[in-house]
Amino acid sequence: MSEFRAFSAPGKALLAGGYLVLDPKYDALVVGLSARMHALAYPHHSLEELDKFEVRVKSRQFKDGEWSYQVSPESGFIPVSVSGSKNPFIEKVIANVFNYFKPNMDDYCSRNLFIIDIFSDDAYHSQEDSVTKHYGSRNLSFHSHRIEDVPKTGLGSSAGLVTVLTTALASFFVPDLTNNVDEYRKVIHNLSQVAHCQAQGKIGSGFDVAAAAYGSIRYRRFPPELISDLPDIGNVIYADKLTHLVDEVDWNITIESNRLPSGLALWMGDIKSGSETVKLVQKVKKWYDSHLPESLEVYTELDHANSRFMDELSKLDRLYNSHDCYSGQIFEAIEKNDSSCQKYSEITDVRDAVATIRRCFRKITKESGADIEPPVQTTLLNDCQTLEGVLTCLIPGAGGYDAIAVIATQDADLKTQTADDKRFSNVQWLDVCQADWGVRKEKEPETYFEK
Ligand SMILES: Nc1ncnc2c1ncn2[C@@H]1O[C@H](COP(=O)(O)OP(=O)(O)O)[C@@H](O)[C@H]1O
Ligand SMILES: C[C@@](O)(CCOP(=O)(O)OP(=O)(O)O)CC(=O)O
């Protein structure tokens, strides 16, 4: 494989199943977004030194965005930084991809240097202190700060990075991957989950990596022990254990394609303040353990409402695709968002399910001190619900002060409706929509070349 190859993986929005998804008992709904992380893999190059491999990753939209690592089979492919600067996500991808493919030095002596460029779409990061440049055939934001100092919008940049980088790096070892990403999707997913958990230093639910690999899905997590039981990277048995885990072990995971209904569009509103997911999760866990059995009852109610929400959305999708007169009336009612909506159980059932989800989150907010749906967000969501074309709206993911997610008809223009409205002055509508495909090959790598 000597040509340039390009891949991309989507960002995510968790619309149902926040907190519950940490437990393998519960399902979640994750939507893949049009904001994507891209990787351009260069043709093979060679280093002067023949006894090691080098991987150079460049993310030129960020200050000092270049990381080089060397690995060798003798040291168990533990990445050693050459450039001095470190990026844990890149480091763990390298460690795992090399341990999985176990390339032999002799086979690669004239092609032991792997160069990959990363590009990220604008919606992942705040645009403050950035300039837009035409690069290749895209407009990209270039930031004046290092990646770790640029505020994020919460679309899952590290999961996208890990997944697309795993794909690009693997394409050096399996030449047919580039044209058969589908065939390798499970391997890419499993390797990416391992690398992402190791880089984060914790084992989250993995819904963000699953969405980067598979797009919009109904998701149920893997048991965390699968990853915590792995030996340390560099251990003589690491490569074998990893390969066994990736290829042979049943992850007991649910990943089913599940998109938002056709005829409806997702809007993500970024709020100019943030919340820390880790702290929220800690508070919720503490509340859960100290409020049993009532907390389990709340989770059970949430889970039922999440399932109803997902099922009702699927029903609306089938209805839209039937293109019959009744379906036309329903979508027209949502478009107007007036009292006519009350006539259709297809609309009220979705709204009731979301009302229950929100009520449960407000209860947890009050009892745990974790601001999942704090009062300002309640007010904002209630205001959003009155806009023309809005079916429903909620706080995505862990909630907090970060963002809101709105499901509206395709023609609804929330930007115009909220432009001069003080109630929405803190909301910045992100330029994203649902794009339900996971990691994939991009057709024209040359569109990423600097002209
Ligand atoms: N475009 C990029 N280039 C290089 N590294 C990136 C890029 N995007 C994200 N990362 C890595 O991911 C980290 C952010 O991860 P994290 O805090 O988990 O945020 P998120 O919630 O967006 O995934 C960054 O500090 C950086 O190490
Ligand atoms: C609480 C959670 O279930 C969902 C968090 O969803 P977000 O979309 O808020 O996640 P981050 O981007 O990592 O902040 C934790 C988890 O599932 O890992």
Image: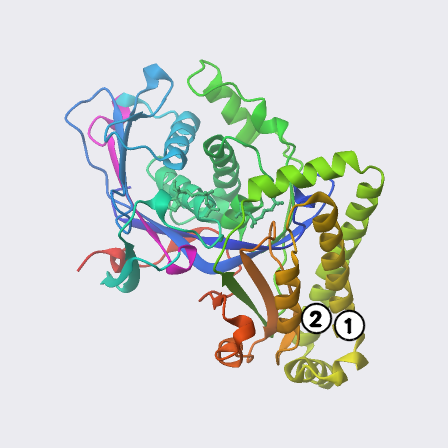
Q: Secondary structure at mark 2?
A: helix
Q: Nearer the viewer, residue 46 or 32?
A: 32
The residues bearing labels 2 and 1 have C-alpha atoms spaced at a distance of 12 Å
Which residue is pictured at 75% across the width and 38% down the height? 288
- Image position of 444 (left or right of 207): left
Regarding mark 1 in the picture, which secondary structure is present there?
Answer: helix
Asked whether the viewer can see residue 191, the reply is yes
Instruction: Determine if residue 23 is in view.
Output: no
Q: Residues within 10 Å of mark 2 (few under 14, many from 20)?
A: many
Residue carrying label 1: 348
Left or right: residue 318 versus residue 263 is right
Name the residue rendered at 52%, 44% in the picture.
209
In terms of image quarters, where does ligand 1 lie?
A: top left
Q: Is residue 127 magenta?
A: no
Closer to us: mark 2 or mark 1?
Answer: 1
Residue at 48%, 34% (x, y): give it: 200
Task: Give the position of the C terminus as an image quadrant.
Answer: bottom left
Magenta region: which residues?
106-125
Residue behind mark 2: 316
Pick the quarter of the image with the N terminus: top left
Residue type marked 2: Leu
Residue 119: x, y in percent? 32, 52
